[in-house]
Amino acid sequence: MQVQSLLLLLVLILLAATTEAGKNKKEKVKKDGSDCEDWRWGPCVPNSKDCGLGYREGTCKDETKKLKCKIPCNWKKKFGADCKYKFESWGACSAQTGVKTRSGILKKALYNAQCEEIVYVTKPCSSKIKSKSKAKKGKGKD
């Protein structure tokens, strides 16, 4: 009976110790973070050229931080990589200008970016008609 009581006491001590250790880890994570809640983030600055990996700098009171970020190489430079838009379908081709137009409505502004609510984009009209049933190479049956 004493052995069972001793084992039960030992299990309870180990359980309490692991629970306390888990709490200490959570507290350390919070201490590493900042108490500041009003961060102002700058644009993502690529390390080289105009796209790819880079960093953005944030400031809050007297603190500054740098976060890693990535600018996709197909982003629209006019809008910035931090402004996300929902675009409608392309309009009809204008015979006068030779371009198609569509508009996009702001869906999300990341890192407090200053974004336009509505943007308009154009592209040249294509002269050739694309066929929808193109055969894929290497995907045929043997």
Image (cartoon, helix red, strand yellow):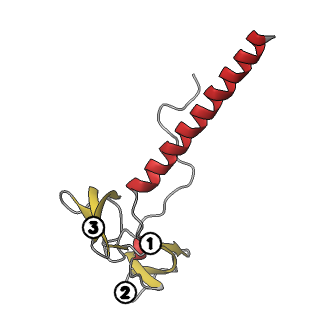
Residue at the location (18% across, 60% down)?
Answer: 49
Q: Quadrant of the N terminus?
A: top right
- Dot 1 amino acid type: Glu
Local secondary structure at mark 1: loop
> In the rendered structure, are the residues bearing label 1 and label 3 in contact, judged by CB atoms less than 8 Å apart?
no
- Marks 2 and 1, how far apart at CA: 49 Å
Whichever of callouts 2 and 1 sits on the residue coming sooner in the sequence is: 1
* Crowdedness near tag 2: few (<14), some (14–19) or many (≥20) residues, C-alpha within 10 Å: few
Q: Is residue 45 left or right of residue 34?
A: left
Q: Nearer the viewer, residue 86 or 32?
A: 32
Q: Residue beneath label 1, please?
A: 37
Single out the mark in the foreground, 2 or 1: 1
> In the rendered structure, are the residues bearing label 3 and label 2 in contact, judged by CB atoms less than 8 Å apart?
no
Q: Residue beneath label 3, please?
A: 64
Local secondary structure at mark 3: strand
- Dot 2 amino acid type: Thr
Residue 20 % position (x, y): 56, 39
Q: Is residue 113 left or right of residue 138?
A: left
Q: Residue beneath label 2, please?
A: 97
* Crowdedness near tag 3: few (<14), some (14–19) or many (≥20) residues, C-alpha within 10 Å: few
Q: Nearer the viewer, residue 11 or 40?
A: 11
Relative to 55, is 105 above or below?
below
Q: Nearer the viewer, residue 15 or 25?
A: 15
Q: Is residue 14 left or right of residue 129?
A: right
Q: Nearer the viewer, residue 67 or 35?
A: 35
Residue at the location (53% across, 56% down)?
Answer: 131
Residue 127 % position (x, y): 40, 69
Q: Quadrant of residue 34?
A: bottom left
Residue at the location (48% across, 85% down)?
Answer: 118
Task: Answer yes or no: is residue 125 visible.
Answer: no
